[in-house]
Image (cartoon, helix red, strand yellow):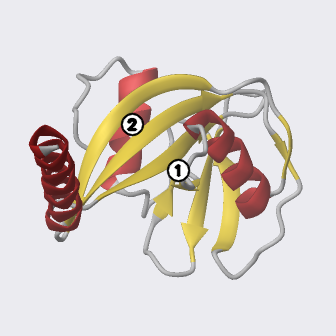
Amino acid sequence: MAEARNSFLQRIGLGASLAFKALATPVAFGVSALAENTQGQVLLVRHSYMAGWQLPGGGVQRGEPPVEAIVRELREEIGLTHSLPPQMAGLFTRRYGLVTNLVALYRVRDIQIAFKPNLEIRDARFFDPRALPGGATASTRRRIAEIYDNAPVSSYW
């Protein structure tokens, strides 16, 4: 009886410890896409709530496989109508204030879209990966340089 009680208390203690750790060090899981059309151009988006041209993506829902999350996000945000299956390109860390984001980057080729501006995404355009627009974010430029120019890979977004 005492052993069962101690085991129960240990489980409660472990649960409380894990809950505290989750609150003390929150981590959000996101996905981004290096999405290319058949001409090899890269899709960049402008959000309504952030500055600059960025790779499309979003959050992974609880219990959702990241590869499914990137397809869902592309459908929701930019009207994805067709693509080849996403291929994992890397896993990166991004600090955002007190929160850490873990970002899975997928390369999604041969995409076709039917984009309509919406509350979240104001603009979506294809660009030559070696001639990115002014205003492309540093992280966007870094990821594209790593893929297309064999630049050294950073673990940070």
Mark 1 Cα within 10 Å, few/some/many (few <14, many 20+)? Answer: many
Q: Quadrant of the N terminus?
A: top left
Taking depth in this image into account, of 65 and 96 the one nearest to the observer is 65
> Could you tell me residue 9's position as x and y percent?
14, 53
Question: Residue at image x 58%, y 53%?
Answer: 56
**Residue 130 in the figure: left or right of residue 81:** left
Mark 2 = which residue? 143
**Residue 133 in the figure: left or right of residue 152:** right
Q: Residue furthest top?
A: 150
> Could you tell me residue 150's position as x and y percent?
34, 17
> Could you tell me residue 113's position as x and y percent?
84, 49
Question: Residue at image x 26%, y 25%?
Answer: 153
In the picture shown, does residue 14 fall above or below 122? above
Mark 1 = which residue? 55
Instruction: Kindly report the distance in space between the C-alpha atoms of the residues bearing marks 1 and 2.
Output: 9 Å
In the picture shown, does residue 16 fall above or below 36? below
Looking at the rendered structure, the kind of residue marked 1 is Leu
Residue 96, image quadrant: bottom left
Taking depth in this image into account, of 119 and 2 the one nearest to the observer is 2
Residue 24, image quadrant: bottom left
Q: Residue furthest front?
A: 1
> Could you tell me residue 26's position as x and y percent?
25, 61
